[in-house]
Image (cartoon, coloured by chain):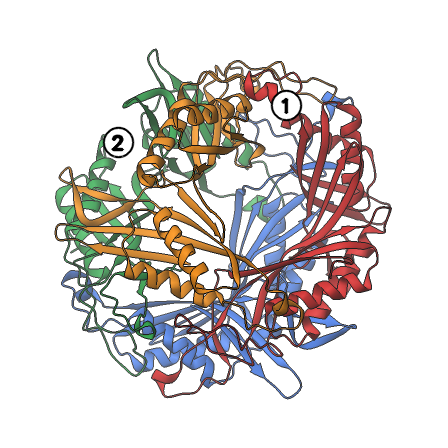
Chain colours: A blue, B green, C orange, D red
């Protein structure tokens, strides 16, 4: 479900664009085995509820919306045991006109890639937030050496490579209310800063440092999972042209090869 | 890793194109915590092994290749506890010239979408096969009615709709050797036939019937999991134009809404 | 505009799925300069006409539909000077059940990729048809040698490479009525056959041979344009592993590099 | 050709990522008709030249690079009559650490979408620059009314809709040297500002105003062409739920329908 919402304030419009994905758990066996649909909540109904709730209430964050949506859902449908909502927020920034943000014109900015996930059951509520596929890279302080060598190894050791990846992160909040927007911004900033400042001995090494930095700084997080595929920049071979290539010109490659991922749980390391 | 292989026979060439995805399990904590890469097998080495094995040996199926690759991998790297290989096969058919298949010219045919997955550990081997995102539809014998109704429901009951989906299936073979190619073809055929012949009361109902038909007919399968998102065709409203629309003209919509999925385990139903 | 149509016959259903793209020419300057929309036919209206015409009339081919749509359009809107309709047909085949085509169940087959284009003005009608992005390849009878060499050249001569491409073709029919479906099938078959049988000295060479074969065989065609990007399969270097690679194992690459295209006009070569 | 370049300065690294597309004109008929490749410059050679030039010389802008590349190309290959280079720049921004831009860590920012095109022949040089597919929208001051009405019209007049589009622009510089980076930034800013400030009576109306504003403000431009597909946000119908929808909640739709485009030439309006 793709939702656009405009909040019309006296001095400006706020603009939200979300992709909302919902999943249900419960005993719907009869629909499968004999085609008895009496307990089935059609996707179309779930969709309608998204738009109606977006109309009726104010939400400053996707987490708030998902908390309310899943709670209402379980209240209304006794046959549903768990409801999960994932919201991806499309990032729109105000266009600057004469250096000032415009009240009702926006330009897309791909740099946020925010996602939220709320899973509500009859017994528990879990709130997660994250970042999806944010391209980041560093051109220094990145080595990869002294790895396992065998007859199939052709990769040379390097002390100075481009480390490029698409950062995907998802963390779980400890129970309770949080300032979801502020928290997201803080975690995102710390992930980028720790990536930038790390002296990397490998993607695994940097990924762990980023996750550990976040868990250490933010007691509000119970765990964090990161995935960072290698997006290789391959040094172009200048030898056929009688030239050196002092780490200057690279071939950009697209296919992610080597997805490195790990999940750190507070107290678990 | 994307691999193309040509097998040159006296009378014809055989052509295989695979996307090979590998995942490892084991204790690589030192690479994460302190950047000690001594146990790390670089992605590049894993890639080299794919091409070398493809050169050295003959394989009539992706399953055979994956079995050999994972077995070799565990034999060579004691630090690896499990190795998983997923192969997606790109489907190429011989071009027909004068009604006869050409010995070395091919045209892509999107209709197979075959995938194989082998997971090998120190104790066990699991072979799975499947189909990914195969578009199928039926224009009759598909109803969806008598579902849960509430104030958010706008979807009308229907006895005659287009049921369109992207079929994704994955099944697990019972231990032992099988004729992987023949088996894949048989299961695929039965999935399509049972889809075509079913009198559907809902996607769940048809999905279950397809899975049950496969498990019943093929003792070689331990389980099967199907996922079938609804790809709606929406009846175009002809009222503004003073016309009826007797289930004839539809708006094609793209976004999958309502992914229905289930896993059937032998003996479990 | 994406259109699905079901034609319900006594013994079977026929199924068509089209993507319809329309373009208009005319003097709409007032809409641009002063926002006077009185002559503007909204996209929404153009879309409605597609669905209504699909309901009202029978069409055995996308060409017939486009001829009628554009003729009606010019008749109804004097402010329109030219109307062009491009239809891409999604290819669906009947599922075979027990070896026989099923009356109302279908599976997508990516191998057709048919397109039609009709451009109608106050003075003329032009009908074009074509194929879009059909993957084809041949593993023999393909050389590329004796090209221009200079200090930037590293590509070696080869007498035996994989020639792989995405075939895009568009041809123009001479004025008059044709059996659009039969013609399309014949031209498509001849393109594939001439590709398969050609002893290629380069993509340009094969492309020309294919285009020339079609123009020679089909007097109904006034011209034909082909585009064939190189989809390289790069021989994997086995030297680091102490092995040869007798044209057997290749790296599949995705990015089209080197789009070769040409247009042949009857009498113009 | 995809190129990554790092320029290593004492205090920081600069990072450029380009997709470079090249097209040649000339008489290469012999390669087509008889497979005589002696005049053919292989794509591989063209690619090598990109990397070697990127290594050898400094370029502050894609325009400078393309000017030099095409000039060299015509100088080295007498058989080439025209060379065109299109460069798309991937936008990377420095990560901020403690509020300061980091010297060698970057995050992708989708907001620029810059492209440059240089076409050099034996007689002339043409430099063009542009923006590709930049998502912009405004939530006020956008009407669409008083358009042509007929029996196929269902779209209502509106005085207040969301105007959303993907901005694609390309302009041609008058002959001579320009500060390519500054100029690009200025034109981009003016396009966004005039979009934001315009009281729109239709996409055509806004597009024209944007193009006219740029041509009026920038004598360095000979022409400008804009394309702006409608990316509709459709008001969600709240009637079935007993609610109004005061322009608040919309369905986001993806398919561009109605690509509006126009080219303005200086002195031509």
Can residue C58 be seen in the rendering of this structure?
yes
Mark 2: give few (<14), some (14-19) or many (20+) Cα within 10 Å.
few
Q: Is residue D13 left or right of residue B38?
A: right
Nearest the viewer among C24 and B113 is C24
**Chain letter of disc 1?**
D
Q: What label does residue D37 carry, if any?
A: none
Mark 1: give few (<14), some (14-19) or many (20+) Cα within 10 Å.
some
Residue A143, image x and y in percent? 68, 40
**Chain letter of disc 2?**
B
Nearest the viewer among D139 and D214 is D214
- Furthest residue toward front: C123
Residue D51, image x and y in percent? 72, 33
Residue at mark 1: D28
Count of numbered badges drawn on the protein: 2
Residue at horizontal 69 percent and vertical 31 percent from the top: A236
| Above or below, A138 relative to A103 | above
Q: What label does residue B181 carry, if any?
A: 2
């Amino acid at each position: 479900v793709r939702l656009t919402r405009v909040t019309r304030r006296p001095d400006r419009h706020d603009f939200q664009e979300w992709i909302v994905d919902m999943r249900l758990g419960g005993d719907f066996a009869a629909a499968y085995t004999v085609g008895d649909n009496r307990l089935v909540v059609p996707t179309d109904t779930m969709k309608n509820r998204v738009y109606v709730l977006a109309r009726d209430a104010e939400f400053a964050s996707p987490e708030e919306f998902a908390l309310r949506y899943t709670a209402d859902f379980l209240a209304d449908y006794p046959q549903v045991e768990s409801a999960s909502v994932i919201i991806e927020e499309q990032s729109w920034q105000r266009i600057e006109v004469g250096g000032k943000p415009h009240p009702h014109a926006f330009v897309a900015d791909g740099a946020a890639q925010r996602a939220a996930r709320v899973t509500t059951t009859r017994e528990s509520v879990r709130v997660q937030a994250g970042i999806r596929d944010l391209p980041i890279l560093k051109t220094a302080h990145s080595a990869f050496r002294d790895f396992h060598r065998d007859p199939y190894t052709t990769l040379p050791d390097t002390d100075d490579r481009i480390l490029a990846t698409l950062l995907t992160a998802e963390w779980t909040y400890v129970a309770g209310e949080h300032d979801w927007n502020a928290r997201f911004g803080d975690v995102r900033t710390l992930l980028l800063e720790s990536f930038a400042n790390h002296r990397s001995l490998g993607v695994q090494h940097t990924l762990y440092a980023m996750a550990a930095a976040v868990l250490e700084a933010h007691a509000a997080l119970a765990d964090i999972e990161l995935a960072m595929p290698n997006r290789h920049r391959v040094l172009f071979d200048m030898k056929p042209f009688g030239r050196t290539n002092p780490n200057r010109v690279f071939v950009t490659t697209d296919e992610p090869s080597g997805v490195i991922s790990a999940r750190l749980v507070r107290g678990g390391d």
